[in-house]
Amino acid sequence: MSDRPPTWDVKRWTLAVVCTATFMLLLDLTVVFVALSSIQTDFHSDLGSLQWVVDAYTVPLAGLLLTAGTLGDRIGRRRVFLAGMALFTAGSLGCALAWSSLSLDITRAGQGAGGALLFGVALPLLGEAFPQARERAGAIGAFGATMAAATAVGPLVGGYLVQGPGWRWIFLINVPIGLATLAGGRLRLRESRGAAARGIDASGAVLLTAGLFALMLAVIRGNDEGWASAPIRTLFAAAAILLAALFVRELRAGEPMLDLRLFGRPSFLGVAVAVFAMMATLVAAMNYTALYVANTLGYGPSATGLRFLPLTIASFVAAPVTAALADRVPPRLTVGGSLLLTAAGLALTARLDADSRWTALVAGFVVAGIGLGAGSAATSNAALSLAEPARAGMATGMVNTMRQVGLATGVAVLGAVFQRRATDATSGQLASVPLPHDTIAALSEAVGSGAGAQAAAGVPGPLRRTVVEAARAATASGLNDILRIGAIAAAVCAVVALATIRRETPTEESAVRTAPATADGLDTTGETAGKP
């Protein structure tokens, strides 16, 4: 906690530095989507390796985020922020210099760890810089808009970078921006700490990260190893044991990393489910949709990014409109409604076949984009408003953790479904084609790995057209399946959100106003912890 009231200069610089860092770390969730085809070509990657390009980033981001917030309360948020920016920038440079799929995954994990430190102290830094309710609302609105913009614009930015200087530049561009942000943070950010910082739950962080890693690895490798194989069963068992141990640990800990009692509040549970669902369905499916546009429809990286522009624009428009309506529309309607729009958009998109053009995606992208933008703004506001001040910081941290867990889970699960469906469909359609069995198996595996029509590049001329048509149909079939699964999951979670999320009653609001301030200086009343 800082002793001096922040000046306008401090406020402006804090908002600029925090939003720049947040934009970078969330952009790196989706900017890689249109680069996956190029990475696959350069490193001869299978689908599992491509999935880890995303999940190697999101797993440490999810596992370390809450611990980062507590660490900032104890040793200083500015110090943790600067350490996170340095690690994120170094990880970005490592990704740009990667020489194999494994080296890229390892450096992506470093990026994710740095991102966790940045994200974990972002809202507390804003809470300290903007102690008054009106100013804070504006700052949090800008923060939420930054999150939505970074997620939506990633494919477009990535497309132009990959088409131009190459895929390594989606990481290399972070280096000068990261260094500039690091300098700005060092010179302009003020140090602050929590008034009553909790202990650091290192055991909880290790259990969560290790449990997620084991679970994602099992799902990603399941098709290749065999779901009933000993390695996969061992990984699932390890994940279950680690996550169960985390549950027991957090229930018994005096100062838990995850206050599981928050999930006992229906409104908070509804918000957490909605955030998880949004990332696990729409954002995760964008990963495979980008591969479809590039490898099956045959568009280059920049053209692929442009095909996502309807989703990007719709998200840009929806986010600020939803934020402006936050005080007038019940959160259950904004959160639940955004998920219903997401489900409708996914269902509209799931109508692809072998002859589909990119325009078949437009209607679904527009509707889903509105859902994404509205959901990003609505869940951020709801997370702050539905927890009392004593747990507001942890509540927002848990919601942001659910975002990353949702994306990691969605990429792994939807990828497993896509791989199985596309592989089987290709094998079935090529069964009567006069090609050796081993060749058909290799082609099927390539299509299941997301290569699409490009898998037919080495097939002799007379048969190439047949293989291309089979690959297009199989890829469309696999993508339709995961889009429908996403639509159903989003719709179910929308019903959960509509049924559980409620505004605080007057009694609860009164309790919020009189409750003690948070340890991280962020409360829902607009007053900073420890401030008169």
Image (spheres, helix red, strand yellow):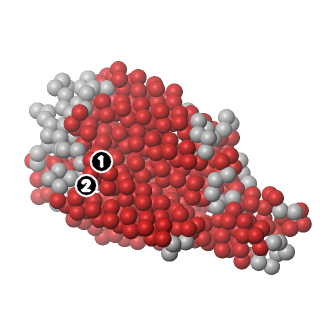
Viewer can see residue 2:
yes
Going by the image, does 116 lie left or right of 248?
A: right
Residue 86 or 346: which is nearer the viewer?
A: 86
Q: Residue shown at 57%/58% (left/top)?
A: 48
The image position of residue 116, as x and y in percent, is: 37, 43
Residue under label 1: 66
Report the quarter where the N terminus lies: top left
View extreme (top): residue: 187
Mark 1 Cα shell of 10 Å, populated few (<14), some (14-19), many (≥20)? many
Asked which secondary structure carries label 2, the reply is loop
Label 1 sits on a secondary structure element that is helix
Q: CA distance from mark 2 to mark 1?
A: 8 Å
- How packed is label 2: few (under 14 Cα within 10 Å), some, or many (20 or more)? many
Q: According to the image, label 2 marks what residue?
A: 258
Return the x and y of residue 212 as percentages of the image width and height: 39, 58
Give the residue at x 24% y 48%.
Answer: 201
Q: Identify the residue at image location x=32%, y=55%.
A: 207
Q: Position of residue 339 (x, y in %)?
A: 42, 63
Is the C-beta separation of discs 2 and 1 under 8 Å?
yes
Please report whichever mark, 2 or 1, sits nearer to the chain's N-terminal start: 1
Residue 249 place in picture, x, y as percent: 22, 59
Kind of residue sitting beneath label 2: Leu
